[in-house]
Amino acid sequence: MYTEMKKSFFALVFSLPIATIGFAQVDTSKQTPESSELWDPVPRIVTPGTPPVNSAPVKAPSDAIVLFDGKDLSKWKDTKNGGSASWPVSDGAVTVKPKGGDIETRQTFDDYQLHIEFRTPAEVKGTSQGRGNSGIFMQGVYELQVLDNYDNETYRNGQVGSIYKQTMPLVNPCRKPGEWQVYDVIYTAPKFNKDSQMVIPPYITVILNGVLVQNHTAIQGTTPYIGQPEWHPHGKGPIRLQDHNNPTSFRNIWIREI
């Protein structure tokens, strides 16, 4: 009996790598946007505490690099052509210019603490991914989703606080449309060896409106709309803000290198 059990055990163990390899093979040509959408479980709604941020931006620490102080976009550039960022600045905020393209910081970063405040439009238009959609890309590669998810259902790994198309938020502490919201992010960059292989993934911790939504989450690779995450070796990268044709606003953006 013991001998037969041992044979069964080793047969199972040595069959696992083969099964794993088979499971990992995905025909990307047959993928659709829906292929990477997760709808369950539903992150529970948490009402965040009342912050002072709705009346005035939080002051940056003394050692922070202020990326946007509400006055101009001199520290930003057009992602596509490298020219001056063209998004409009008014009343201390910068607002997405629909069809104006993404913008990104001129300076690049590795590991950091990032603070950024955003506001989705007070006038609600659209549903699901069409409501206040934008994104904040770590190192210009990995997207932290910005979306109006106040009484607005969408796929869970595409709602506010998600690592887009990968990891859904722990909870949903979204404020009402037109109210300022706050992201505080701790991010550590991936590490690649001399053969361009990823040996340590990027990790991200995200607090949205004072509530933890990502807890030292390992980012699985790029965050495409269609398809699965991929790894592309890179060094330092910018903070990139996405133009998703919704007039979402940002203010008080600062970063601390760690």
Image (cartoon, rainbow, N blue to C red):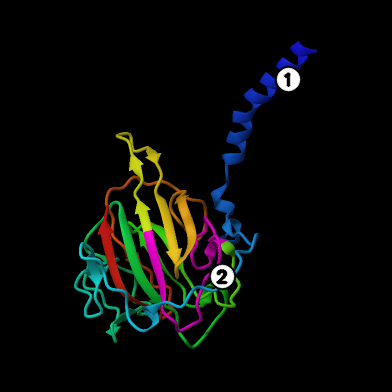
Dominant secondary structure of the magenta stretch? loop
Q: Amino acid at mark 1?
A: Ser
How far apart marks 1 and 2 lie (CA) works out to 49 Å
- Seen from the viewer's position, the closer of residues 23 and 149 is 149
Q: Is residue 77 above or below residue 168?
A: below
Circle 1 residue: 8
Inspect the magenta stretch and tell me whether residue 63 lies in it.
Answer: no
- Seen from the viewer's position, the closer of residues 24 and 151 is 151
- Seen from the viewer's position, the closer of residues 219 and 244 is 219
Q: Which residues are magenta?
A: 157-185
Q: How dense is the environment of label 2, judged by Cα within 10 Å: few (below 14), some, or many (20 and up)? A: few
Give the side of residue 149 with respect to residue 84, left or right. right
Give the side of residue 2 with respect to residue 137, left or right. right
Circle 2 residue: 46
* Mark with earlier residue (1, 2): 1
Q: Amino acid at mark 2?
A: Val
Q: Secondary structure at mark 1?
A: helix
Give the side of residue 130 with respect to residue 15, left or right. left
| Residue 247, x across and y down, in percent | 41, 81
| Residue 223, x across and y down, in percent | 45, 56
Instruction: Quadrant for the N terminus, please.
Output: top right
Q: Secondary structure at mark 2?
A: loop
Inspect the magenta stretch and tell me whether residue 172 lies in it.
Answer: yes
Q: How dense is the environment of label 1, judged by Cα within 10 Å: few (below 14), some, or many (20 and up)? A: few
Q: Is residue 36 above or below residue 15?
A: below
